[in-house]
Amino acid sequence: MELIVNGQKQELEARTIEEVVIHFGLEGRPVVVEADGTVLTKEQWATAEVRPMMKIELVHFVGGG
């Protein structure tokens, strides 16, 4: 299905937000997820279903100096 992730159209076979996070290799990292304007807690990811053209923002933190 087509989703908009971080402002770019993506074709993903994902049913939940958790599957989107896994697709981008962000599981186990500090990540903030916003879906259609709503920030989701990590506990919500497994049950939050994605819909075609859903706008998802994935914000992850990287260290450095």
Image (tube, rainbow, N blue to C red):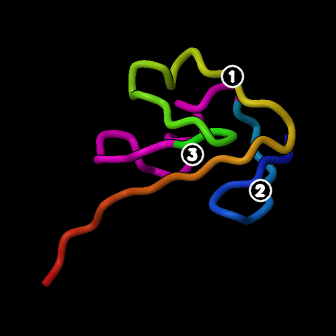
Q: CA distance from mark 2 to mark 3?
A: 11 Å
User: Few, some or many C-alpha atoms within 10 Å of disc 2 (few <14, some 14-19, many ≥20)?
Assistant: few
Identify the residue position indicated by label 1 in the image. Answer: 49
Q: Pick whichever of labels 2 and 3 is earlier in the sequence.
A: 2
Outermost residue to the front: 37
Give the labeled residue for mark 2.
10
Position of 57 with respect to 29 (left or right) is: right
The kind of secondary structure element at disc 2 is strand
From the viewer's perspective, is 21 left or right of 53?
Answer: left
Q: Earlier in the sequence, mark 1 or mark 2?
A: 2
Q: Which mark is residue 57?
A: none
In percent of width and height, residue 13 lies at: 76, 37
Q: Which residues are magenta?
A: 15-33
Q: Is residue 41 above or below residue 55?
A: above
Q: Could you say where residue 61 lies in the image, as x and y percent from the top left?
A: 30, 61
- Tell me the tag on residue 23: 3
What residue type is disc 1 on?
Answer: Glu
Q: Amino acid at mark 3?
A: His
Q: Is residue 15 left or right of residue 39?
A: right
Tell me the kind of residue under disc 2.
Gln
For label 3, the SS is helix
Q: CA distance from mark 1 to mark 3?
A: 15 Å
Q: Nearer the viewer, residue 18 or 36?
A: 36
Residue depicted at 86% across the width and 37% down the height: 52
SS class, disc 1: loop
Q: Position of residue 1 (x, y in %)?
A: 85, 40
Q: Which residue is located at x 64 percent, y 47 percent?
A: 56
Q: What residue do we see at 81% from left, 31% from top?
A: 51
Asked whether residue 46 is drawn in magenta, I would say no
The residue mark sitting in front, 1 or 3, is: 1
Work out whether 25 lies above or below 13.
below
Which badge, 1 or 3, is on the more N-terminal residue?
3
